[in-house]
Image (tube, rainbow, N blue to C red):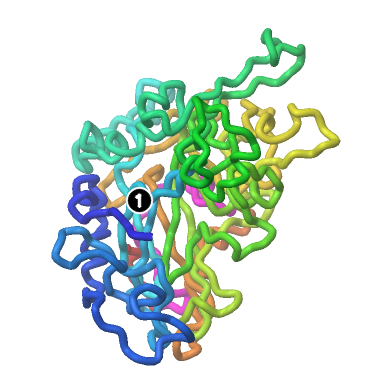
Amino acid sequence: MVANGRCGAVQTALLVLALCASAVAVRRQGNNSCPEGTQSGCQCETQCCRPGTLQFGDSPDTNKQSFCTDKPFQEQYKMRILEKVPVQINLRDYCTDTILFSSYSAPKVDKFSLVEFPCTYRASDCTLITDTIGQEECMAGFDVYTKELNCTGSTSFYEKFVSSRICSQDIERKSNDALFYDPGHEMFGSGAFGAAGVPATIGACNCNYTAAIRATTGRVIRGRTYTDKDLQTLSVGVPNGFIKEGMSTFYVEIVMGGRSTAERGSDTECICSGPADVSAACLCELGTKKIPYVYNNSFVPALTVLVSMRKGQLYYTNTFVKFNFEETRASCSGCAPDYCYGVPLAQDPDKPPTENFPEMWRRTDFNLRLKAGKVCAVPVEPPLYNPEYYCRMPQTQDEVNRCSLKVYIAWSGTDRYDTPLESSNMMFSKFTQMGVGNIASQFLASGGSMVRQIGSRAGGRGSDLTA
């Protein structure tokens, strides 16, 4: 994996919370030296690295900014509390797993840290808010978002990157035929899906695998006439119908020390073999490891990543870098089914097609059912049945932006000195006794703003929460 993010691109996209600056703070040492005694069989540069070195293959003579995160750190390097460690945040394409955008940060071990992408969603239309006080608040937030934070216009990250990567009817024009649109069907419609009582489904954007099949098998595909057998030759991609209308065609991945939130094989109960796989294990992987930023034309505002290490290293058994969700039925409390992203129901041969994937996954309104809800998305404008549930814009520059893409990083396990890590106690799933386990719901439940004033360790050594 070679990242393609540049510090200049990050600045252009207004990722202003020191994604470049904090990464530069990790000493840049080059990648042309490797001390003796790396972990068993680990070859310099290609199989392991020192924190702060370049990604293998990247030249220090260019303005391309990268830091080694995709390989295990050398055995001599063991992380200790409050030491900076490079973390890579990727936006990856669902169809090809290609990294579309990368940024780097250097959070401190056992410090509950925030990395924020401030300009990733469009501003709300305040005229759609009927409450007078709410409309005034919206207009004040609009001024902060557009004028003080400069988060609108053609140069914003939303317009430059996000908006063209949301599944819609014109996706083929936007994606150069990398995806094609599959329309849904309406209840009591006519034609192939016209049986009375069939619940409505929305459209989907299916991956065009013709080039991938040709590269894998040599078989030339005419049009999109490939078969399930052709799909079985591929290991990269998602099943047809998974990328629903209103959903981003990319997912969020966090990488550190050779471990990834999208890591395949670390959990045999949640593993996907490729785009032909619609098993429960595959859908579990998609629902828990490959989280979109945009879902139902709404935004997944924050994800919490738990880094679990042992003796300051990440290659032991039961160490990982993974998303943390509250494993209760209340994980999507506070949002309607349409806004709850999670694990789709797998196919059940004893049920009709309308009760199986992907038809059930593409249901609308309150007809959608999931095997497990994971995280709420928040609409830009409030739905009629819940006028408080929308992307409130920040009232000050210091306020955490409610719907911008945010990654919170917490730590568990022990550092190089076997000192227990405590910041996992700071995770949002433990901030309430009411079972509300996702950040979006807690923002809405609290009704208040959230600023970067969270202590870094549960033991009391507090400081502002920064990336």
Can the viewer see residue 63 in this picture? yes
Q: Position of residue 79 (x, y in %)?
A: 40, 82
Q: Give the image quarter of residue 37.
A: bottom left
Q: Position of residue 101 (x, y in %)?
A: 33, 49
Residue 104 drawn in magenta: no
Quadrant (top left, top right, bottom left, bottom right) of the N terminus: bottom left
**Residue identified by numbered label 1:** 400
Q: Residue type at mark 1?
A: Val
Q: Is residue 337 above or below residue 127?
A: below
Quadrant (top left, top right, bottom left, bottom right) of the C terminus: bottom left
Q: Position of residue 143 (x, y in %)?
A: 24, 34
Q: Is residue 224 above or below residue 334?
A: above
Q: Residue at x 82, y 33 (%)?
A: 351
Q: Residue at x 36, y 79 (%)?
A: 82
Category of crowding for the residue at label 1, using alpha-carbon neighbours closer than 10 angstroms: few (below 14), some (14–19), many (at least 20): some
- Which is the main secondary structure of the residues drawn in magenta? loop
Depth check: give the residue in front, 79 or 61. 61
Q: Is residue 371 above or below residue 4?
A: above
